[in-house]
Amino acid sequence: MKGQVYLINHNIEWVAILTENLQFSIIEIIGMPMPNIGDMVSGEFESFGSTTINNRTQNDNFDGFIQEIYADLQHARTMLKWDEERKHCESI
């Protein structure tokens, strides 16, 4: 499945990926490298647990743990402890 990195919270190292079905998968990044906002990615985004994600934009892979699937934008922001006033949060 393809998707795009839509939200990032650098403090907790979680990202929200907007999947091709127009819902969000919430992923805790394990290790490095961290993706960037807008990166195009592919992987298994519809199953909970450990996964490896291909960052097509950076031509690299990163490991993650899927915490939530089929989330809407409001739920994604809640899970990422989204706060637009803080510097550690990024969005498209």
Image (spheres, rainbow, N blue to C red):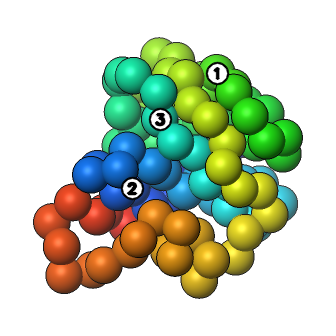
Horizontal relation, residue 80 to residue 19: left or right: left
**The residue under label 1 is which amino acid type?**
Thr
**The residue under label 2 is which amino acid type?**
Ile
For this orientation, the residue located farthest to the top is 60
Disc 3 from disc 2: Cα separation: 10 Å
Disc on the earlier residue, 1 or 3: 3
State the image coordinates of residue 2 (x, y, percent, origin top left): 72, 41
Disc on the earlier residue, 3 or 2: 2
Disc 1 designates what residue?
52
Disc on the earlier residue, 1 or 2: 2
Q: Residue at x 18, y 73 (%)?
A: 86
Front residue of this view, candidates 31 and 44: 31
State the image coordinates of residue 27 (x, y, percent, origin top left): 58, 45
Q: Is residue 73 visible?
A: no
Horizontal relation, residue 29 to residue 47: left or right: left
In terms of secondary structure, where does tag 3 sit? strand
Q: Which mark is residue 29?
A: 3
Q: Which quadrant would residue 91 be assigned to in this image?
A: bottom left
Q: Which quadrant would residue 54 be assigned to in this image?
A: top right
In terms of secondary structure, where does tag 2 sit? strand
Q: Which mark is residue 8?
A: 2
State the image coordinates of residue 87 (x, y, percent, origin top left): 15, 66
Q: Which mark is residue 41?
A: none
Q: Residue at x 29, y 50 (%)?
A: 10
